[in-house]
Image (cartoon, rainbow, N blue to C red):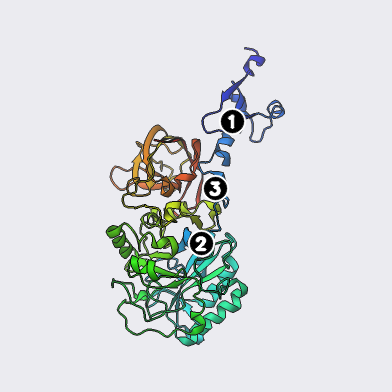
């Protein structure tokens, strides 16, 4: 065959999911060896002249942002940011200062920096009496190390707005006496200056919370409380507590009688986020003000959800803040499933950011979109008192059928440095949403192939409430004699998932990129 015959150009029709238009016919050489032998970056003048792709360019296109599974429009702030703060899910950290467990772990200002870099917009400051008149932050009555309150406020000033320009809420857990409370206020005002919210925007008692786009940068939540009592209980010292439950040492006991005095200066800072105990849905709707919030442990929240299908009453979360925090007895700083709390409309679902795992994967996935600004607008049925939505039944307007074909994976990482270390990978696709939607399905495993395993298996799903659903792609190494080993994962909202042929760029257990490891899938979704 002549050289001319070998170089005959052909075309490939664009697969489903690739953009139509002038470039949708992609010429390449039938003799692809010429492409393979060309060094990276080689320019083919004929292809460039006609504004067309060669085979290697097509492969790079598929691996680029244009071929990513995440809707690129959702990587910017695309949602309405003019609604009240309580209409958003807000990325929230628990025990933000800890880098390890809550018994003997290290407290560090670096933990705040990492939380802000991950888009967190509500951080916790566990404030205790320190030496030399300086309040400190640590997990009280434990062996955790201490850091200065002043240093944390400086970190908030310097790092809280590098990643997101939207407000940061400071969850103040006060265990200090009057003198050091005054010191706390002095540090916040001196270091944060005009960034600190000190009064309502119009000087009046608020009828509703301000929006993220007009709120001052730093919003204190709470100004004090009963010694050992977290902001989940009381800020003002003499209100009633809910049902007692076991707590970690720093959280004290809900039956403590002696209330700490709260200095007026600190009390005045709790403008929009005044913590009050939840008594009942009727009480909340009848007398709770927009600037007040209720907090629940995960156990209390589950109990309310099981009893009424609502955490604090779903209607309560449409106009007021609800905050959920991990059970205090979790000494290893483990997390709870945040999805069930989001299903109920809770805005501030606090997690231990220092503890990797499925729960933090879900949190990262929830706040991956809207520019990763830390605020995600709740679905309309969780923002309206008129909407009738029960997260327990979870039946929305109608089911949506999704077919997800897992085709291949590329360059999966080894689990250790041994030359013989080769994974036997399989892919699990998890849907996290309301009870009716939550399901997990997986492929078969492929023996000894982490370089380019091929499955071509189709998994089918039916979703009733896609607005709340998260999709988690997990790759694990199959083991016949022990637990399967984690290889990589990627989580995103179902509503931000793009159809067609897509690449999924895998992340490690702690959220770091595993490039160039990817999954290649095809997705098709339709209303039933």
| Residue 329 to residue 409: above or below | below
Q: Which residue is mark 2?
A: 84
Q: Which residue is mark 3?
A: 74
Q: In which quadrant will I find the N terminus?
A: top right
Q: Which mark lies nearer to you, 1 or 2?
A: 2
Counting residues from the start of the chain, the first of labels 1 and 2 encountered is 1
Q: Is residue 387 left or right of residue 204?
A: left
At mark 2, the secondary structure is loop
Counting residues from the start of the chain, the first of labels 2 and 3 encountered is 3
Q: Quadrant of residue 275?
A: bottom left
Labelled pair 1, 3 in contact (Cβ < 8 Å): no
At mark 3, the secondary structure is helix
Q: Is residue 127 left or right of residue 6?
A: left
Can residue 395 be seen here?
A: yes
Can residue 327 be seen here?
A: no
At mark 1, the secondary structure is loop
Q: What is the C-alpha distance between the residues marked 2 and 3?
A: 21 Å
Q: Quadrant of residue 9?
A: top right
The residue closer to the viewer here, 92 or 233, is 233
Q: Which residue is mark 1?
A: 20
Label 3: how many Cα within 10 Å (few below 14, some 14–19, many 20+): some
Q: What is the C-alpha distance between the residues marked 1 and 2?
A: 40 Å
Query: Which residue is depicted at the point 66% across and 36% down?
Result: 41
Count of numbered badges drawn on the protein: 3
């Amino acid at each position: 065959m002549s050289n001319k015959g070998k170089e005959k150009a052909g075309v490939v029709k664009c697969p489903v999911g690739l953009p139509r238009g002038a470039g949708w016919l992609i010429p390449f050489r039938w003799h692809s060896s010429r492409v393979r032998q060309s060094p990276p970056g080689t320019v083919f003048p004929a292809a460039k002249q006609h504004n067309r792709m060669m085979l290697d360019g097509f492969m790079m296109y598929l691996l680029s942002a244009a071929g990513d599974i995440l809707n690129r429009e959702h990587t910017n702030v695309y949602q309405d940011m003019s609604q009240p703060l309580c209409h958003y899910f807000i990325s929230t950290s628990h025990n933000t200062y800890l880098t390890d467990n809550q018994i003997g772990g290290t407290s560090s200002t670096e933990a705040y920096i990492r939380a802000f870099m991950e888009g967190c917009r509500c951080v916790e400051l566990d404030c205790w009496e320190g030496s030399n008149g300086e309040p400190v932050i640590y997990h009280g009555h434990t062996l955790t190390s201490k850091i200065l309150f002043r240093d944390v406020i400086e970190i908030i000033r310097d790092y809280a707005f590098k990643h997101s320009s939207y407000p940061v809420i400071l969850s103040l857990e006060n265990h200090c006496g009057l003198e050091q409370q005054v010191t706390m206020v002095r540090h916040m005002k001196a270091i944060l200056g005009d960034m600190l919210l000190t009064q309502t925007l119009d000087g009046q008692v608020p009828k509703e919370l301000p929006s993220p786009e007009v709120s001052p940068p730093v919003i204190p939540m709470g100004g004090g409380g009963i010694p050992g009592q977290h902001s989940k209980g009381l800020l003002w010292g003499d209100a009633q507590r809910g049902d007692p439950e076991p707590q970690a040492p720093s959280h004290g006991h809900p039956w403590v009688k002696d209330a700490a005095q709260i200095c007026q200066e600190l009390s005045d800072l709790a403008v929009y986020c005044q913590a009050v105990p939840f008594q009942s849905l009727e009480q909340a709707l009848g007398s709770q003000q927009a600037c007040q919030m209720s907090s629940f442990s995960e156990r209390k929240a589950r109990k309310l959800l099981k009893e009424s299908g609502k955490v604090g009453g779903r209607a309560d979360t449409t106009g007021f803040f609800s905050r959920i925090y991990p059970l205090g007895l979790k000494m290893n700083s483990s997390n709870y499933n945040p999805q069930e709390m989001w299903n109920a409309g809770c805005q501030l679902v606090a997690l231990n950011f220092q503890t990797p795992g499925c729960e933090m994967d879900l949190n990262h996935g929830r706040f991956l979109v809207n520019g990763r600004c830390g605020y995600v607008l709740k679905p309309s049925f969780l923002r309206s008192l008129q909407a009738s939505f029960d997260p327990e039944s979870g039946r929305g307007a109608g089911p949506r059928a999704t077919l997800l074909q897992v085709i291949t994976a590329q360059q999966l990482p080894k689990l250790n440095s041994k030359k013989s270390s080769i994974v036997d990978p399989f892919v699990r696709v998890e849907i996290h949403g309301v009870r009716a939607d939550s399901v997990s399905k997986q492929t078969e495993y492929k023996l000894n192939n982490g370089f380019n395993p091929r499955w071509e298996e189709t998994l089918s799903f039916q979703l009733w409430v896609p607005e709340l659903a998260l999709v988690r792609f997990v790759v694990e190494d199959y083991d016949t004699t022990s637990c399967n080993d984690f290889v990589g994962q990627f989580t995103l909202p179902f509503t931000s998932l793009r159809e067609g042929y897509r690449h999924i760029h895998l992340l490690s257990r702690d959220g770091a990129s595993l490039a160039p490891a990817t999954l290649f899938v095809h997705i098709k979704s339709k209303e039933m």
